[in-house]
Image: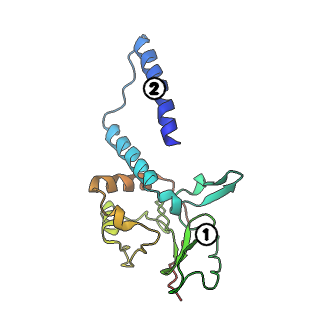
C-alpha cells in the first residue's frame, strides 16, 4: 500500500513542481536545517514499518476486511484493558510444538511462556519516553531491557535488529519519539509452567 502511495505521489509532485515553476513567484524552499530531521523521521518510519514492528506492537481493530492497525494506539503494545486468554492443554509443551497469539497479535504464548509486546510510544511512565537514544541502541544490541531483563526472542527478532546500523537505529528511535505518547501499562512476561 505504501508503494502505491509513492507512485501516485510522484505525478502529483511533478505537477506541483511544474506549476510552481511557471508561477510568477519563486517556489517556497524549506529551511535546510529541517531537512535532516525530516529525512531521519521518514527513514525511521520506513524502517519501523518494513521491520514489522506494527505486527506485534500495535493493537488491531477487527473490521469486515480483517484486522487493521488501531491508529489511535500505534506501537503502544499489548492493551492493558485485555487479559491473556487461557492456553488450551497440550498445545504447547516439550512433546508438542506451536505458539499462540492474541486476536490482535500483541500477546504471544509458546515454550518460552507468555510474552506481551512492549509500549514503544514516548509515554514517560509506561513507554520508552525516558529512554535515551543510547539506551534504545544498547537494548537492541544486547537483547536486554534497561532493567536487565532479557528480551524474549519470540516473537521479538532483536537478534536481527541488532545488526542494523547505528544510523538506522537512531532513525527508528527518532520516529518512535515523534509519536503521540499512549499511556498503556503492559504486563510482565509470564514464564512457562
Whichever of callouts 1 and 2 sits on the residue coming sooner in the sequence is 2
Q: Specify whether 22 is left or right of 96.
A: left
What is the x, y in percent for residue 152? 43, 75
Residue at image mark 1: 102
Locate residue 105: give its quadrant.
Answer: bottom right
Q: Residue furthest left?
A: 166
Q: Nearer the viewer, residue 118 or 27?
A: 118
Q: Residue furthest right?
A: 64
**Label 1 neighbour load within 10 Å: few <14, some 14-19, many 20+:** some
Q: Against 190, is 75 above or below? A: above
Quadrant of the image containing the C terminus: bottom right
What is the x, y in percent for residue 9? 49, 31
Front position among marks 1 and 2: 1
Q: Nearer the viewer, residue 166 or 159?
A: 159
Q: Residue drawn at (34%, 32%), measured in percent from left and top?
A: 31
Local SS, label 1 = loop
Count of picture labels:
2
Which numbered circle lies on residue 41? none
What is the x, y in percent for residue 83? 64, 75
Q: Specify whether 155 is left or right of 140.
A: right
Q: CA distance from mark 1 to mark 2?
A: 41 Å
Q: Against 190, is 102 above or below? A: above
Residue at image mark 2: 13
**Label 2 neighbour load within 10 Å: few <14, some 14-19, many 20+:** few
Q: Residue drawn at (57%, 57%), measured in percent from left and top?
A: 73
What is the x, y in percent for residue 25? 41, 14
Kindly tell me whether residue 28 is visible in this rendering.
yes
Amino acid at each position: 500500500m505504501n508503494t502505491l502511495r509513492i507512485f501516485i505521489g510522484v505525478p502529483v509532485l511533478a505537477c506541483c513542481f511544474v506549476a510552481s515553476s511557471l508561477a510568477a513567484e519563486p517556489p517556497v524552499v524549506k529551511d535546510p536545517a529541517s531537512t535532516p530531521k525530516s529525512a531521519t523521521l521518514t527513514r525511521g518510519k520506513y524502517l519501523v514499518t518494513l521491520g514489522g514492528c506494527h505486527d506485534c506492537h500495535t493493537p488491531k481493530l477487527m473490521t469486515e476486511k480483517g484486522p487493521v492497525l488501531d491508529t489511535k494506539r500505534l506501537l503502544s503494545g499489548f492493551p492493558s484493558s485485555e487479559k491473556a486468554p487461557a492456553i488450551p492443554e497440550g498445545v504447547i509443551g516439550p512433546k508438542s510444538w506451536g505458539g499462540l497469539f492474541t486476536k490482535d497479535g500483541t500477546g504471544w504464548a509458546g515454550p518460552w511462556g507468555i510474552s506481551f509486546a512492549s509500549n514503544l510510544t514516548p509515554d514517560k511512565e509506561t513507554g520508552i519516553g525516558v529512554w535515551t537514544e543510547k539506551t534504545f541502541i544498547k537494548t537492541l544490541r544486547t537483547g536486554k531491557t534497561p532493567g536487565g531483563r532479557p528480551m524474549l526472542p519470540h516473537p521479538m527478532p532483536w537478534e536481527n535488529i541488532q545488526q542494523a546500523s547505528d544510523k538506522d537505529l537512531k532513525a527508528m528511535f527518532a520516529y518512535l519519539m515523534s509519536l503521540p505518547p499512549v499511556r498503556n501499562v503492559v504486563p510482565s512476561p509470564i514464564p512457562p509452567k
